[in-house]
Image (cartoon, rainbow, N blue to C red):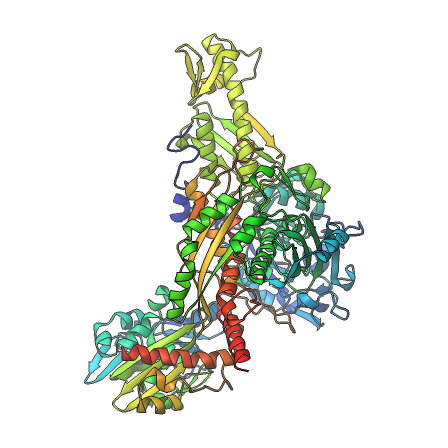
Amino acid sequence: MTTATGIGARVKRREDVRFLTGTGRYVDDLPLARATYAYFLRSPHAHAKIKGVDLSEAEKMPGVVAIFTGKDLAEAKVGSLICGWVVKDKHGEPHKAPPHPVLAADTVRYVGDPVVMVVANSHDEAKDAAEKIKVDYEVLPANVDLAKALDKGTAQVHAEAPGNLIYDWELGVKADVDAAFAKAAHVTKIDIVNNRLIPNAMEPRAAAAEYDKGTGHYTLWSTSQNPHVLRLILSAFVLGIPEHKLRVIAPDVGGGFGSKIFCYNEETAVCWASSRVGRPIKWTAERSESFMTDAHGRDHVTHAELALDKDGKFLALKVETIANMGAYLSTFSTAVPTYLYATLLAGQYTTPLIYANVKAAVTHTAPVDAYRGAGRPEATFVIESIVSQAAKDLKVDPAELRRKNFIPSTAFPYQTPVALQYDSGNYPPIIDEAMKIADYRGFEARRAEAKSRGKLRGIGFSSYIEACGLAPSQVIGQLGGGVGQWESAQLKFNPTGNVQVITGSHSHGQGHETTFAQIVSDKLGVPLENIEVVHGDTSTTTFGMGTYGSRSLAVGGSAIMKAADKIIAKGKKIAAHLMEASVDDVVFEDGTFKVAGTDKNVPLAQAVFAAYVPHNYPLAEIEPGMDENAFYDPANFVYPAGTQICEVEVDPDTGETQIVNFTAVDDFGNIINPMIVEGQVHGGIAQGVGQALLEHAVYDKETGQLVSGSYMDYTMPRADDVPSFKLGYKVTPCPHNPLGVKGCGEAGAIAAPAAVMNAVRDALAPLGVTHVPMPATPLSVWQLIHGASRAAAE
Amino acid sequence: MYDFAYHRPKSLADAATVLKGKDEARPMAGGMTLIPTLKQRLARPTDVVDLGGVKELAGIKVEGSNLVIGAMTKHVTVATSADVKRMIPALADLAGMIGDPAVRNRGTIGGSVANSDPAADYPAAVLGLNATITTNTGKHAADSFFKGLFETALGEGELITSISFPKPDKAAYMKFRNPASRYAMVGVFVAKTGNTVRVAVTGAGPAAFRVKAMEDALAKNFTSEAIKDIKIPADGLNSDIHGSAEYRAHLVGVMARRAVDAANK
């Protein structure tokens, strides 16, 4: 049913009214009576032994309520934070799992590692007291340079991970791939670094906790993307609070991009300490703390080789990656460079043989974990960089080389050599459409015109695939994941006919309150204003898995569809009773139950009312009430795909790169709200552009200090860094979920870095520049141009 | 932020009185540097003397061929002033390029010049236009004002009251922004007055400085062509993750040429 508010309608985001008028309610907004405030004293060193902590002066400071150290937590048997995904190395051994203390007790391992928690009557008093704490550090050499992290003689991060190696993991059969390389007509090789990023959600992380002595209940408000999972981790692994005695609430959350999936030190400490202190405790990260301690993203060093036959068909791909885990293993860190990365290395291509070797290393830097795209941007960057390089090597058109190797539309479902089975897709029409929108044919004329203005113009492609909609629980379990990956939904009608849509996913910018309402409105014919989407509170929602990996619509939306089917099934029975008809003759259309071929009808609202006021109701056959629950466990991942084309102009005098054209054509399956999808794509591309040209988390290689620790040095993309995007869509509906949807949240960020970097490489190629590191900052591009012109002069 | 006593005097004399004898007191103009510094607990003044209430310090006057800008005049006022646009459009352009709208609506010319931030824009104009800095105790020539990193010729308790800019024949300011902070990584102010040319650079070194070789070449031939072969030594220039000293030295040349071209338009 297509209506003004149903599936496919450009409904304005309903939640934006409160966000834009300052009436959102975030964790820091909570008015908690008698609240205290926590401040974390953090390590100023990348690596040091803690020889002593002297609290004597701090304890005397005004307003201090309590001070806790790592020793206090250890004595109270607070557990280590966990890594929830066991990756088995190439010998079948589980990854090394060094402990991750909530507060460091003996050793600090990155700048920002929390050491002491001060609780005081105000934030300032907590901070004042923290300044009086004397920590005696013995500073040790730091291991900061990822490329050298696994080398002999590099400072060791954990005794439990000898040589700083967490795992040496592989996928594919190396001998088969080597044999294919031996027969190749051409081999293209690249060395690339996927730069480390800092997520920078608009709202910093925050936590508040309150303990009810009378009932023994804890309530933790957290900026979480998945409150049930956070509760599970805190209950079962870290704090031992029974799950039913811990309520986790993630109210309005201002962006996450993955960084708020994980269970962090501060929320754990605040929750634990709330019962000791006997008053509520609040903590909100300062922006500098966000830079230092939010889990960072990406950070790979990779060598890749692609073997091609004489016709340009891909024969085999070989990828060697060192992935940075940071100082401790964050919640899902181990899965990102393995199951979310190497399994994507087929891309959109028929490459028959793939071998990937990933070594995960610990370093004296902030923990690294999933960040918008998580593994898939890294995979796309490898594939799309090497394919474009191969096209340059072979002097063939990059679009033609891609097209030649695309998986044909007739081959779906397509089994890749890297475990995944793509369910659906049709790639050639996507690149055709993108080339049309980008006016690819006209590019050479534009390049010549730019040259006349002294500018270097380049064009770059990126044809990405992602596996998202996480995911079939049993597959995840086989791969070492510690949780199920279904989603829950509950449709709870009230007697007056309005309905609460209770979802186990979590919205922190995605627009679920609109999209999910549209699904229900479409399916059940309930007006949008009678639908409320509820999420984020473990006490008012069914257990759910939260939001990440572009899963909420494909999995959470499907759960809503299942619950709606149950509503319709029950409604039919009620309506049949009211219409004195056989259930088999009742149909549900436009929100009304009807008997085919008659004018008898019962609107859904009437059936709902009858269910709550069951005076004329088949009580012997069905229960009263209209409240249905559903869990949906997907049959497969979903596989959005698309092609982006980026066109840049480089100013050779300054090294500045300007994006002058950006086209993205995506196949997201069916689209519920095109306006929200556009917003997701725009934001994703901006983040991808940020990675390609601007953003770079830089640690000083000697001291391990975070050099890019504020907006003075960490370059966030701004509106004037990106052009107006030209978007297009092709639709192959997902065959295995009831909505036919695929997920759009990460696509932009996954594809854009390669599109931009390929364009910059293309722009600089005429100068003889063959390697452009990411991010292509003005300094780095100028150095390349300068180096090339100097080489030419010599 | 640590506690401090806050004062908001109504006159320059009152401000001087409050500051007198207090070693750790800090005057505050727009607060665009001081307030973030306080918030990060990087400064611990005993007293903050807010000059925002001193009416006599704000405003723009034309005195003969000079433009006299009060120390507490906000960037937005300079950027949009008809007098500034008419007499020294390059100065209005420069003010309009400082920071973002929020900064331009709070930040002041006196605060910027007194602070001598190596990446601030105004010092290039003060030096490039050979301005005179008037204070509550005397006058300073631009050439002897900027001493180094956050260091000026201002004495203890000395407050800038106004800055007087002589009208040039032509002038322009070009800056290359730090990609992250958008402060000037290199900003070059070029001004031609009669047969004299001044080329002042901000962002590249510890404080604003002039480029004599370019000035001499431009005095003979005021075209970008005239300075295209002049290399700026990288020694002593700033270096960070956004720009090496060599890159900054190179950008001084690029921005100077662009400024000359813009001045000639």
Q: Is residue A65 left or right of residue A617?
A: right
Q: Residue at x 54, y 49 (%)?
A: A403
Q: Which residue lies furthest to the left in this view?
A: B64
Pick the front one: A389 or A565: A389
Of A634 and A436, nearer the camera is A436
Q: In the picture, residue A477 is in which quadrant?
A: top right
Seen in the image, is B218 located left or right of residue A523? left
- Where is A382 relative to A635, above or below? below
In this rendering, does residue A584 appear at all?
Answer: yes
Instruction: Give the residue drawn at x 50%, y 14%.
Output: A574
Q: Can residue A98 be seen by looking at this rendering?
A: no
A540, above or below B126, in the image: above
- Residue B177, position as x, y percentages in the image: 42, 71
Q: Position of residue A352 (x, y in %)?
A: 67, 47
Front residue of A393/A324: it is: A393
Query: Which quarter shows the C terminus of chain B?
Result: bottom left
Furthest-top residue in this view: A580
Point out residue A6 in the picture as x, y percentages from the top left corner.
Answer: 42, 32
Q: Where is residue A296 in the image (x, y as percent from the top left)?
A: 59, 58
Number of callouts: 0
Q: Quadrant of residue A128?
A: bottom right
Relative to A331, is A202 on the left or the right? left
Does residue B77 lie above or below A624 as drawn? below
